[in-house]
Amino acid sequence: MKIGNIKIDTPVFLAPMAGYTDYPFRVLCKRSGAGIVYSEFVSADGIIRENVRTLEMIHFTDEERPIGIQIFGNDPEVMSKATDYINKNFKPDIIDINYGCPVPKVTKRGGGSAALKDLCLMDDITCAVIEAANNTPVTIKMRAGWDRDSIIIPEAGIRLEEFGVKAITLHPRTTKQKYTGKANWELIKTLKQSINIPVIGNGDVTNIADIQKMFEYTGCDGVMIARAAQGNPWIFDQAKSLFDKNYKPKTTSLVSIASMCKEHFKLLVNDKGNSTGMNLMRKHFSNYLKGFPKASIFRQKLVTADSYKNMVLELKAFENYALSSGL
């Protein structure tokens, strides 16, 4: 698979997720085999104001390449300036426009999937970003429409391709649905049949079987993984077996879970410092520690550890248990 001039080994990608796809998590998913990783979605306004926290969110290393930086905003000029700034200062492989976020605090300001209500604005933003991106491929992540009475697939896909967009990721729910109901994979199939650029499917993919079903049912070129990767970076390693029948995925043992927790914690602390890294790790422990004897006990102790020292001790206790359990 190629997006623009970027060759992708495994067409299974890590989705941009607010509060999750920071540097440590992206690195772990990339090491596990994700074909592309994406930053958390970042505000174009924050970028051009050079907001420190915003710029920290899009810092990346060469180990993560190919990487996409996802931006959102409601003003074509601001989006253009943000794109130019990202290109000159960060040099990502892909710039992705967020037309998919359904969160009210974003859509009320005209960002995210609010653009689906005004295709002329979507046209203007897209063209502005493509022009400013120079030769960096511009991709789109979008929803199917604002509500069930205003589905814009495949019409929006056709015009986005004409403007020069290099790939489209479709989450086939509406903004009004948010994350409820069922993702309509038929719309991914329709979009794929209507355009010539790569189509990446997203939505209701929870395991390897779902990845395979999405490829087979929709004919999509790639699959984007979101919540199914939380606490499970191994899903990308497992996905490799779909494209190479001789590939043997790594076994997800309790020892490997403990090892991943330890590495994730180390990366977070090195990146954010002891206190912030410890606090950010709590949600990851909740995702990693499930489905084995005493999981709830270790999870509770790690999530509620009241100091960096105690979290290190509890993590060591879990590691020892994993080594002795034989699981």
Image (cartoon, rainbow, N blue to C red):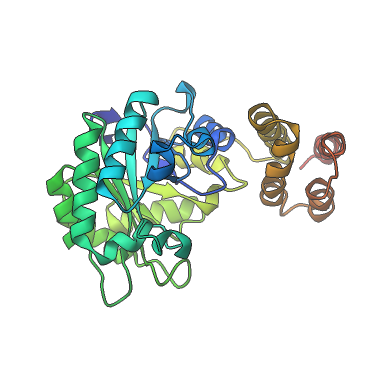
Tell which residue pokes out farthest to the bottom in this image.
149
Residue at 57% x, 40% y: name it. 234
Residue 93 seen in the figure: no
Q: Nearer the viewer, residue 1 or 106?
A: 106
Q: Nearer the viewer, residue 121 or 316?
A: 121
Location of residue 41 in the rendering, given as x and y in whole percent from the top left corner: 44, 46
Residue 54 seen in the figure: yes
Quarter of the image where the C terminus is located: top right
Location of residue 123 in the rendering, given as x and y in whole percent from the top left corner: 19, 53
Tell which residue pokes out farthest to the front in this image.
49
Q: Nearer the viewer, residue 213 or 130?
A: 130
Residue at 38% x, 29% y: name it. 66
Residue at 53% x, 53% y: name it. 227
Specify the quadrant of the image occupied by residue 12: top left
Residue at 28% x, 29% y: name it. 6
| Position above or below: 105 against 88 | below
Location of residue 71 in the rendering, given as x and y in whole percent from the top left corner: 38, 44
Tell which residue pokes out farthest to the top in this image.
62
Relative horizontal placement of residue 281, taking residue 111 as reference (left or right):
right
Relative horizontal placement of residue 129, taking residue 215 as reference (left or right):
left
| Position above or below: 18 against 257 | below
Location of residue 294 in the rendering, given as x and y in whole percent from the top left corner: 83, 52
Specify the quadrant of the image occupied by residue 25: top right
Relative horizontal placement of residue 242, taking residue 119 as reference (left or right):
right
Q: Nearer the viewer, residue 288 or 85?
A: 85
